[in-house]
Image (spheres, rainbow, N blue to C red):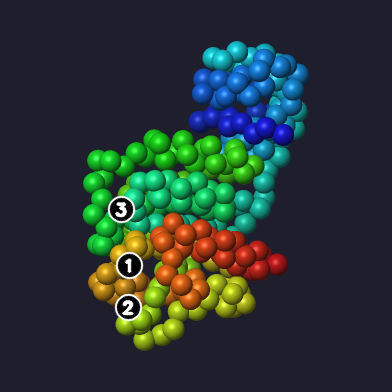
Amino acid sequence: MRHFFLDLESASLPAVGELVNLDKEESHHLGTVLRGGRQQEVVLTDGRGHRMDARVISQDRRQASLEILTVSRDDAEFMAPKLVLALSLIKTKRFEWALEKAVELGVHRIVPLMTEHVVKDLKNTKVKRWQTIMRTAIKQCGRSYLPELQEPQSVEGFLQDSPPGLKIFGAIPEEMGLNEQPISLLTLAESKPSSIPENLTALIGPEGGWSESEVGLFLEHGLQPITLGPHILRAETAACACLAGLQSVRQAWAG
């Protein structure tokens, strides 16, 4: 069944039987996909963790009206720990690809990081475009939760005001001079804590790697180094591999 985004902004969740209107962009999309068909049923999400079955009542490319048939809450989206990805600002196309896949892999918050080994002109960052990519991704994968996208920030700034919970960072010990071996995500899954943290935050660096001072900050703030396997991964690949593993950790801890 087709999925569409219902932008409620500050409005309350609609009730069964209520009529709602899609915004211009979603109405155009629905009109293109359904080609004017009425009485067809679709799935709506508000991006806040709610899913609604709805029937098309009227439509054109400017506005579509739908009747709400069912309303449900996706409890799995709200269980602890939630997933946070802090990803270095890499090349634009690769960063956007990582954004899309992070949404599909269940991330709840994304933080673009300004790292020492990446020179990125922030004037070229397109936050609005990123938000559009993420919104399209939740419809494509059938999620009901639109991750929060924060403004780009420095590593130090992020660590000073980061989400509570367990924090890990991708590490290559021979490049960083780490005294301790990074643990695998399998080991992390097996070491279920007595109290489940509110968030699981993963920091993924640029292809140039973390700087010595950044690694020092991570260790100073008690971050756990982790390994994603025997090979050196591109940043966007590492982000996906890490989130896939953290979803397994999340499921293991919830069980």
Q: Are marks 1 and 2 in contact (CB under 8 Å)?
A: yes
Q: Amino acid at mark 2?
A: Met
**Taking 179 as reference, is 115 above or below it?**
above
Dot 1 falls on a residue whose secondary structure is loop
Task: Name the disc covering residue 176, or none.
Answer: 2
Q: Is residue 16 left or right of residue 65?
A: right
x, y percentage for residue 74? 67, 46
Q: Is residue 227 left or right of residue 140?
A: left
Q: Is residue 78 left or right of residue 222?
A: right
Q: Amino acid at mark 1?
A: Gly
Q: Nearer the viewer, residue 16 or 103?
A: 103
Dot 2 falls on a residue whose secondary structure is helix
Task: Kindly report the distance in space between the C-alpha atoms of the residues bearing marks 1 and 2.
Answer: 9 Å
Q: Nearer the viewer, residue 23 or 238?
A: 238
Can you tell which of label 3 and label 1 is closer to the viewer? Answer: 1
Q: Residue furthest bottom?
A: 179
Dot 3 falls on a residue whose secondary structure is strand
Task: Indicate the quadrant containing the N terminus: top left, top right, bottom left or bottom right.
Answer: top right
Task: Kindly report the distance in space between the C-alpha atoms of the residues bearing marks 2 and 3.
Answer: 23 Å
Task: Name the disc covering residue 153, or none.
Answer: 3
Label 1 neighbour load within 10 Å: few <14, some 14-19, many 20+: many
**Residue 88 lies in what quarter of the image?**
bottom left
Q: Amino acid at mark 3?
A: Gln
Task: Kindly report the distance in space between the C-alpha atoms of the residues bearing marks 3 and 1.
Answer: 17 Å
* Mark 1, residue position: 209
Task: Indicate the quadrant containing the C terminus: top left, top right, bottom left or bottom right.
Answer: bottom right
Q: Earlier in the sequence, mark 2 or mark 3?
A: 3
Name which residue lies at 46% across and 72% down.
231
x, y percentage for residue 58? 67, 13
**Taking 230 as reference, is 13 above or below it?**
above
Name which residue lies at 26% across and 45% down.
122
Q: Earlier in the sequence, mark 1 or mark 2?
A: 2
